[in-house]
Image: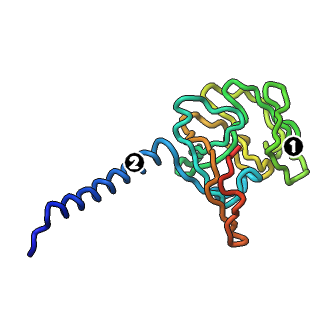
Amino acid sequence: MPKRSKQEKSAFREYAEAIVIALILALVIRTFIVQAFKIPSGSMLPTLQIGDHILVNKFIYHFTSPQRGDVIVFKYPKDETRDFIKRVIGLPNDKLEIRNKRVFVNDHPLDEPYISHSDPGVQEESISPRDCFGPVIIPPGKYFMMGDNRDFSMDSRFWGFLDRSKIRGKAFLIYWSWDSEKFRPRWRRIGVIVH
């Protein structure tokens, strides 16, 4: 059996080292910096469509706090094996109230150009917290999350405040979008910044 030359061994070792380094970098990036997620539901319509694939910055909240309006991915408080994506509406110590579908923060109506209401009816608070809620004071270290598709979103109105420790990161870019009904890519959505 012929022996490998030193040059062949060196080339094999270089490739092996490059692959190991690439895998370690990919793991570090995915764990601490950026992670990809797929949107499975319509709770964030029209901002995010079912089939959008987004990138999430997992690094940003090590240096700054979530701001009102940020779209974030977090561990669902009722089942931490699942990830949810919603918008930050209420910050720690805010007074928050929903009156007839309108959100008030610290007694001022919130300007929300991103929301969608598909049900014109208003449900009383005794029936559901969907359209009338609060007022509540958001505790320190907690956030009030809502989907942009207000009439069809399971969010803080139903399961309570989100603890900061459950936040995974901030959505910032749609890198791919697939329309499963028409079985084709949504080319215009690729590269769109998430606001």
Q: Is residue 176 above or below residue 86?
A: below
Residue 83 higher or lower than 145, as above or below: below
Residue underneath mark 1: 124
State the SS at label 1.
Answer: loop
What is the distance, in whole Å, between disc 2 and disc 1 at their CAs?
52 Å
Determine which of the numbered discs, if any, sits on residue 186 in the image.
none
Q: Position of residue 166 (x, y in %)?
A: 55, 39
Residue type marked 1:
Glu
Q: Which residue is mark 2?
A: 25
The residue located at (55%, 35%) in the rendering is 60
Contact between labelled residues 1 and 2, with CB atoms less than 8 Å apart: no
Q: Quadrant of the N terminus?
A: bottom left
In depth, the one of 123 and 44 nearer the eye is 44
Q: Where does the image place residue 64, in percent across and percent down from the top left?
A: 58, 29
Q: Position of residue 190 (x, y in %)?
A: 66, 57
Is residue 126 toward the left or the right of residue 164 in the image? right
Q: Amino acid at mark 2?
A: Leu
Residue 125: x and y, percent? 83, 41
